[in-house]
Image: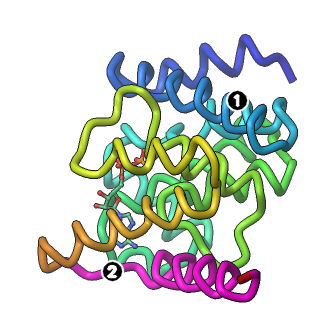
Amino acid sequence: MNLEALREATRAQMPEKRWTHTLGVVDTALELTSRFGGDPAKAELAALLHDYAKAWPILRQEQVIREQGLPKELLDYGKELWHAHVGAWVVRHEHGIEDEEVLNAIRYHTSGRENMTHLEKIVCLADYIEPGRDYPGVHKIRQLAEHNLDEALTAGLDSTIGLLLERGECIFPLTVLARNDLIRRRKQKE
Ligand SMILES: Nc1ncnc2c1ncn2[C@@H]1O[C@H](COP(=O)(O)OP(=O)(O)O)[C@@H](O)[C@H]1O
């Protein structure tokens, strides 16, 4: 696999702003990997590809979900969630990415899930705190990310859940499960 070609293919899927965000996630994922450990090559690849399908027309995303047997329950929740699963499917089938760890980091980067791998946590957190992100609470999450991957990620998930509650929107349960799991594990360690 040629990383440069993959970079160009990814860039071609999205407008400039989303590409700048992607590069921010790559840099942040590499930074988090040097801080907390992990495989930098996998972190770079998963971060590069995490938003591959984000700018695709929503009907095209829906078509992939329906026709390729992706979880249909996604269709009952916010469309913002779809691109993660669609992206994992597309990079596998169009670019031959077979590494399940990388595919899962793409697939769960928006929602999180229970028992997240180290790589999944790195990509999900990098998405929350890359330098272009600006939302209430991001500063605190960045501070936590200086020292503690799990606490920072929990705070990120909290901010998403809080936002959805505020907006009166449905919450895709994996995010709640991810948060509960991180909190339980922290309590077990105390
Ligand atoms: N559990 C969830 N249930 C419903 N919507 C969610 C959930 N988790 C995330 N989202 C939606 O996805 C959005 C995150 O998407 P975004 O910030 O664009 O990140 P990404 O870089 O992953 O596309 C949230 O603002 C929210 O609208």
Sort mark 2 into few (<14), some (14-19) or many (20+) by Cα contacts within 10 Å: some
Residue at 68%, 41% (x, y): give it: 91
Q: Looking at numbered disc 2 in the image, what kind of residue is underneath it? A: Ile
Residue at left 68%, top 37%? 32
Q: Which residue is mark 2?
A: 171
Q: Closer to the camera, 13 or 129?
A: 129
* Secondary structure of the residue carrying numbered label 2: loop
What is the image's colouring? rainbow
Residue 153 versus residue 96 in the image, above or below: below
Q: Position of residue 56 (x, y in %)?
A: 39, 41
Give yes or no for residue 112 being in the magenta stretch.
no
Quadrant where the C terminus is found in the figure: bottom right
Q: Is residue 89 visible?
A: no
Residue 15 in the image: state x and y as whole percent: 34, 22
**Where 73 sits versus 155, above or below?**
below
Residues at circles 2 and 1 in contact by the CB criterion of under 8 Å: no
Q: Which residue is mark 1?
A: 30
Tell me the crowding category of disc 1: few under 14, some 14 to 19, or many 20 or more residues within 10 angstroms, Cα based: many
Residue 134 shows in the view: yes
